[in-house]
């Protein structure tokens, strides 16, 4: 058995005592992410660079100590929750832009760099990094790689996997290697693609080579106002069906609009049933033609108003509400449970009706804000976890909504990952041989069961229960066996 004292001593020798947290009050904030699950780790390590990451992983492997990788903790599927306690390896000390090459339009960054900081640095050279999660001011590039994150502006340009050329990774075995490189095309098996979206179950990325794109010459954002979600949903299908693929095509319902407008004052019409944010970019003449076409479709399908924002300040104000909408929902209930299902665009109306039915039957308000252009729904179930039994009801309601997405030919996740919260739903999509073949990938990277356990694939013994308090740990004291 390993004592806590031994674990902390070895970690301190490996990366410095000042870079290891162990006090209960410090550990608490590393026991959750953007979901509702909680579990306190035994320690949090902050290595700097691949060599120190490898040291920590090897120590944990020797001690049979579970490892949970963590970026900024903004994930929305429980991926950074230390389900079996163990050691959290955080990337907060690795946040440099190592290289920015405007000629070849690539950058080399560390995993702890905040998403928006990359685009801010690239903007000085007329470039930007396309994936832009709503949490981009806080979320990290390393976390984006782990979850294959998307964002509002990924409709036309693709998600994280489309913008990562190569990575330095430390595998779950504690070995350092490169996957991919600095050019888009490579031969052999795409291990880079396997690692992206693996949700921290194969290793930890320590350097990332990203692809940068030129900033568009012209950007126009439309705010189309509708009386109902149904009208807005039909408009989404019509816009894409016309051959127009906007840079972004987002929808918010009345509940979300009212919360966002009350909290952020973005100029949204709070009495509207739904709005669409349609962003078009490119060469000026082409964009103006697209704006005319998109406006016509919106009015044809029932829009009561279509506002046009051409100046950067106007556009930023509209997007402020969209990207801050989920946080604004705290005005309605203290907690939310956000879902991440994907459905064919043609089935949006049907699935949204199912969401409304679940909301009414459970008596739980549900706010809807989603990437309508690619059918990626984000129903937010609003609740108060202080009410006995409320959390269990929320999870049941969420499961029904996810099943509704699957039943129309959809998927469990568009950008948040499967994590802990949805791994039990994987058999809805995959056969037992499929899941067994996925599981075979983990040992190839050195994961024998202790590297981000209970995530992504259906889990076995020891993963079904989450301790939402650490009373036993407090009672056992600093020398308790772990």
Image: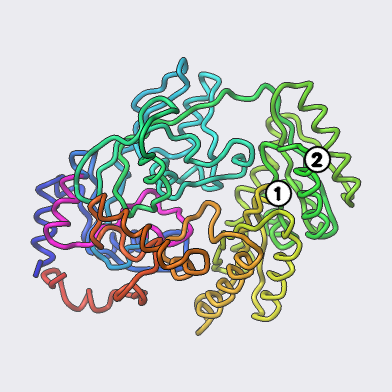
Residue 28 placement (x, y as % from top left): 32, 64
Question: Are the residues tagged 1 and 2 within 8 Å (C-beta)?
Answer: no
- The residue lying toward the viewer, choosing from 243 and 70, is 243
Sequence-first disc among 1 and 2: 2
- The residue lying toward the viewer, choosing from 426 and 255, is 426
Question: Quarter-wise, where is residue 133 in the image?
Answer: top right
Residue at 66% x, 79% y: name it. 363
Residue 23, can we see it?
Answer: no
Read off the residue under disc 1: 265
Question: Quarter-wise, where is residue 384 in the image?
Answer: bottom right
- Asked if residue 77 lies in the magenta stretch, the reply is yes
In the picture, the quarter occupied by the N terminus is bottom left
Read off the residue under disc 2: 242
Answer above or below: position of 233 versus 166.
Answer: below
Q: What stretch is highlighted in magenta?
A: 54-80
Question: Quarter-wise, where is residue 106 in the image?
Answer: top left
- Asked if residue 477 lies in the magenta stretch, the reply is no
Q: Distance between the residues labelled 1 and 2?
A: 33 Å
């Amino acid at each position: 058995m390993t004592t806590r004292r031994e674990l902390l001593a070895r970690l301190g020798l490996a990366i410095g005592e000042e870079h290891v947290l162990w006090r209960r009050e410090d550990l608490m904030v590393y026991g959750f992410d953007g979901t509702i699950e909680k579990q306190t780790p035994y320690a949090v390590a902050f290595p700097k660079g691949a060599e120190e990451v490898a040291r920590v992983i090897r120590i944990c492997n020797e001690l049979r100590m579970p490892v949970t990788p963590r970026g900024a903790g903004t994930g929305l599927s429980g991926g950074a929750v230390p389900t079996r306690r163990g050691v959290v390896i955080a990337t907060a000390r690795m946040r440099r832009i190592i290289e920015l090459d405007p000629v070849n339009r690539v950058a080399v960054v560390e995993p702890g760099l905040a998403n928006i900081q990359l685009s801010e640095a690239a903007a000085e050279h007329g470039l930007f990094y396309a994936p832009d999660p709503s949490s981009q001011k806080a979320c990290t590039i390393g976390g984006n790689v782990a979850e294959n994150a998307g964002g509002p502006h990924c409709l036309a340009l693709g998600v994280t996997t489309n913008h990562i050329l190569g990575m330095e990774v430390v595998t779950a075995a504690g070995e350092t290697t490169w996957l991919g490189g600095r050019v888009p095309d490579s031969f052999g098996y795409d291990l880079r693609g396997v690692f992206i979206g693996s949700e921290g179950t194969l290793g930890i990325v320590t350097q990332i080579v990203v692809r940068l794109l030129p900033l568009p010459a012209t950007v126009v954002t439309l705010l189309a106002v509708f009386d109902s979600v149904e009208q807005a949903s039909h408009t989404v299908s019509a816009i894409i069906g016309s051959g127009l693929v906007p840079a972004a095509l987002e929808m918010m319902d009345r509940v979300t609009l009212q919360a966002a407008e009350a909290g952020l004052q973005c100029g949204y019409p709070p009495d509207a049933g739904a709005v669409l944010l349609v962003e078009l970019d490119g060469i000026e003449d082409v964009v103006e033609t697209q704006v005319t076409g998109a406006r016509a479709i919106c009015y044809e399908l029932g829009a009561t108003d279509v506002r046009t924002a051409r100046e950067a300040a106007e556009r930023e104000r509209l997007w402020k509400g969209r990207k801050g909408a989920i946080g604004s929902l705290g005005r309605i209930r203290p907690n939310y449970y956000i879902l991440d299902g994907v459905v064919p665009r043609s089935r949006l109306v049907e699935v949204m009706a199912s969401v409304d039915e679940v909301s009414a039957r459970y008596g739980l308000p549900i706010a809807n804000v989603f990437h309508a252009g690619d059918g990626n729904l984000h129903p937010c179930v609003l609740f108060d976890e202080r009410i006995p039994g409320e959390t269990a009801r929320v999870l049941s309601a969420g499961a029904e909504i996810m099943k509704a997405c699957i039943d129309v030919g959809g998927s469990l996740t568009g950008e948040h990952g499967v994590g802990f919260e949805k791994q039990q739903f994987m058999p809805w999509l995959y056969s037992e041989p499929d899941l067994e073949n996925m599981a075979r990938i983990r040992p190839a990277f050195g994961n024998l069961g202790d590297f981000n356990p209970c995530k992504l694939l259906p889990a076995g013994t020891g993963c079904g229960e989450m301790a939402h308090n650490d009373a036993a740990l407090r009672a056992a004291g600093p020398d308790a066996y772990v």
